Image: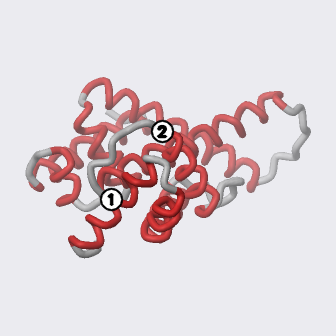
Amino acid sequence: MGSQKEETSLTELLREAQGGDPSAAEQAYGLIYRRLHDQARSQLRRQGAEHATLTPTVLVHEAWLKLSAADFKINDREHYLAMASTAMRQIVVDAARARMSQKRGGQAVRVTLTDEVMARDAQDVDVLKLEEALQRLEQLDARLAKVVQYRYFAGLTEEEIASLLGVTDRTVRRDWRKARAFLHREIRGSP
C-alpha cells in the first residue's frame, strides 16, 4: 500500500480525470496501472481464464475505459479499486457468456472435443456458476457479497475492506468465512 500522500494524490487525480482532465487521467492511470494489472492477472488466474481472449492488460484497459465513462463519485483509492474489481468481474463474466453462446451455435463452428476444449468449457461454466452464486448471495446479504467482491476480485486487505464497509477487521473475517461457505455450497451443491 502506498503512502497517505500518494493515495491522496491518486484520489485527486482520479477525480480530475473523471471531470474530463486528460492529463490527470494519464497520471492517474500511470499511478494505479500496476495495482490494476496485478488485480486482473490474479482474477484471471483464479477463474482459470488463462486460455481466454482476455489478458490482464486487455482486462485493465477495458475496465479503465468502462470506469472512465461511468458517472460515480470517487471517494478514495480503495473505493476506486473496488469499482475496478466490479468492472473486471463484469467483463470476465460477459466474455465467458459470449464464449458459451458461441459454442451453442452462435458461430456454428465445429470443434473436436479434446481435453483442452473440454477444460475451457468447464472453466467458463465455473465462472458463470460463481457469478450466479454471488448474485444469490447479494440478494441474501449484500455485505457478504461486498466482502467477496472486495477480497476475491479486488484483492483488498481486511483492513481496507473494513474501512470501506465501516465495520471491524474481525467482522470482515467472519463475513469472509460465511461467504466462502455459502459460495462453496452453491457452486458444489453440497449441504
- The residue drawn where x is 46% and y is 39% is 130
Crowdedness near tag 2: few (<14), some (14–19) or many (≥20) residues, C-alpha within 10 Å: few
Residue 123: x, y in percent? Answer: 60, 48
Q: Quadrant of residue 189?
A: top left
127 or 143, which is in the foreground?
143
Rendered view: 142 above or below 119:
above
Which residue lies under the disc numbered 1?
A: 12
Residue at figure coordinates x 49%, y 59% from the top left: 25
- Between 19 and 78, which is closer to the camera in this rendering? 19
Q: What residue is disc 2 on?
A: 70
| Residue 17 seen in the figure | yes
Amino acid bearing label 1? Glu
- Which disc number belongs to residue 113? none
Image side of residue 187 versus residue 141, left or right:
right
Q: Residue at x 56, y 40 (%)?
A: 93
Q: Nearer the viewer, residue 173 or 110?
A: 173
Judged from this view, the residue extending furthest toward the top is 139
Which quadrant of the figure contains the N terminus? bottom left
Q: Position of residue 65 (x, y in %)?
A: 57, 49
Residue at 57% x, 43% y: name it: 91
Cα distance in 3D space between marks 2 and 1: 17 Å
Q: Is any atom of residue 126 visible in this view?
A: no
Q: CB of mark 2 within 8 Å of CB of mark 1?
A: no
Q: Position of residue 4 (x, y in %)?
A: 21, 71
Q: Quadrant of the C terminus?
A: top left
Residue projecting furthest to the bottom: 3
Circle 1 crowding by C-alpha within 10 Å: few under 14, some 14–19, many from 20: some
Going from N to C along the chain, the mark reached first, 2 or 1, is: 1
Kind of residue indicated by mark 2: Ala
User: Which circle, 2 or 1, is nearer the viewer?
Assistant: 1
Dividing the picture into quarters, in which one does residue 178 lie? top left
Left/right of residue 143 with respect to residue 85 in the rendered view? left
